[in-house]
Image (spheres, rainbow, N blue to C red):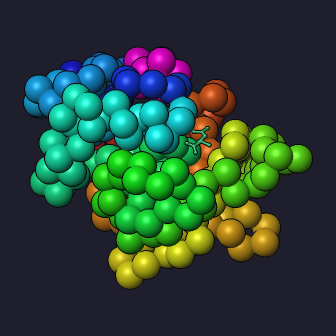
C-alpha cells in the first residue's frame, strides 16, 4: 500500500488524510524527520504559514523536507503549504521560515478582508472537465512564475493560483475541503 505523508504540525491535515484514505492510500502524519522515511510523497496542508514554518524549524524538519523534495519525491503545498514552498513571499512575517523550493513569488493574504474567503470554478486542463470548485480561505496568490514553473489554474483576471514545477505542486486553494478528489489523484500519479 502506498504511504503518503501529511505534515501534521498545524492546520488542515486531517482533511487531507481523509481524502487519501478514501483513495486507498495510507496517510502518515509527519511531525519528525524520521517520519519521512519510506514515503512516496508528502502534502503540506493549509493553516498558518508562520506557525507551520516555526514548528518545522523547531523540530528540525526544514532541511529534511528540502532534501525530500530534492530527491525527486512529490511534494504538494495547499494554501499555507504553498507559501512555505515558495522562494519568495510578499507581505510575510519578517524572518518567517520557508522551504524555498519553488521558483515563485507568493503574496500572503492577497484578497484582503472583504473577500478573504470565496469559492470559484476553475478550469484546470490537467484535470479535464468539469471545472474544479476551488475554496479560497485567506488565500495567497502567485505573483511571479519563474522558469520551469507551469501554471495549472488561474482566476478569471489571470492571477495564477495553482502551479507545478516538476515534482512540486502548489495550490492557493483547499481541494481537501470538497468532495472532488481530482487534485489528490493527480498528485498520487506524480507519486507513482
Ligand atoms: N493566510 C494563511 C497564511 O498566510 C494561509 C491560509 C490558509 O492556509 N488557508 O499562512
Q: Position of residue 70 (x, y in %)?
A: 17, 57
Is 110 one of the magenta-colored residues?
no
The N terminus lies in quadrant: top left
Kindly identify the residue that appears in the image at 52 percent across and 25 percent down: 12
Occupied quadrant, residue 160: bottom right
Instruction: Tell me how many marks there are.
Output: 0
The residue lying toward the viewer, choosing from 165 and 80, is 80
Occupied quadrant, residue 155: bottom right
Occupied quadrant, residue 6: top left
Q: Is 67 drawn above or below residue 42 in the view shown?
A: below
Is 20 one of the magenta-colored residues?
yes
Question: Going by the picture, which residue comes out furthest to the right?
Answer: 114
In the figure, is residue 106 to the left or right of 192?
right
Q: Position of residue 139 (x, y in %)?
A: 66, 48
Ligand 1 lies in quarter:
top right
Say if residue 84 shows up in the picture.
no
Q: Main secondary structure of the magenta part?
A: helix
Question: Going by the picture, which residue comes out furthest to the front?
Answer: 94
Q: Position of residue 41 (x, y in %)?
A: 26, 39
Kindly identify the residue that appears in the image at 17 percent across and 47 percent down: 63
Q: Is 148 drawn above or below residue 167 in the view shown?
A: below
The C terminus lies in quadrant: top left
The residue lying toward the viewer, choosing from 164 and 90, is 90
Q: Position of residue 150 (x, y in %)?
A: 46, 71
In the figure, is residue 137 to the left or right of 64?
right
Kindly identify the residue that appears in the image at 36 percent across and 36 percent down: 54
Q: Is 83 drawn above or below residue 56 in the view shown?
A: below
In the figure, is residue 95 to the left or right of 59?
right
Say if residue 104 shows up in the picture.
yes
Region of the chain picked out in magenta, as a range: 13-22
Amino acid at each position: 500500500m502506498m504511504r503518503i505523508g501529511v505534515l501534521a504540525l498545524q492546520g488542515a491535515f486531517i482533511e487531507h488524510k481523509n481524502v487519501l484514505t478514501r483513495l486507498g492510500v495510507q496517510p502518515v502524519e509527519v511531525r519528525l524527520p524520521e517520519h519521512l522515511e519510506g514515503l512516496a510523497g508528502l502534502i503540506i496542508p493549509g493553516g498558518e504559514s508562520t506557525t507551520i514554518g516555526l514548528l518545522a524549524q523547531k523540530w528540525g524538519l526544514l532541511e529534511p523536507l528540502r532534501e525530500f523534495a530534492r530527491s525527486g519525491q512529490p511534494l504538494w503545498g495547499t494554501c499555507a503549504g504553498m507559501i512555505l514552498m515558495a522562494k519568495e513571499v510578499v507581505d510575510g512575517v519578517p524572518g518567517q521560515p520557508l522551504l524555498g523550493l519553488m521558483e515563485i513569488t507568493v503574496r500572503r493574504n492577497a484578497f484582503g478582508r472583504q473577500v478573504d474567503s470565496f469559492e470559484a470554478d476553475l478550469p484546470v486542463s490537467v484535470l479535464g472537465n468539469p471545472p474544479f470548485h476551488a475554496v479560497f480561505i485567506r488565500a495567497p496568490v502567485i505573483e511571479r512564475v519563474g522558469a520551469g514553473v507551469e501554471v495549472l489554474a488561474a482566476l478569471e483576471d489571470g492571477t495564477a493560483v495553482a502551479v507545478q514545477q516538476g515534482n512540486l505542486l502548489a495550490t492557493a486553494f483547499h481541494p481537501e475541503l470538497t468532495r472532488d478528489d481530482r487534485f489528490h489523484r493527480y498528485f498520487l500519479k506524480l507519486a507513482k
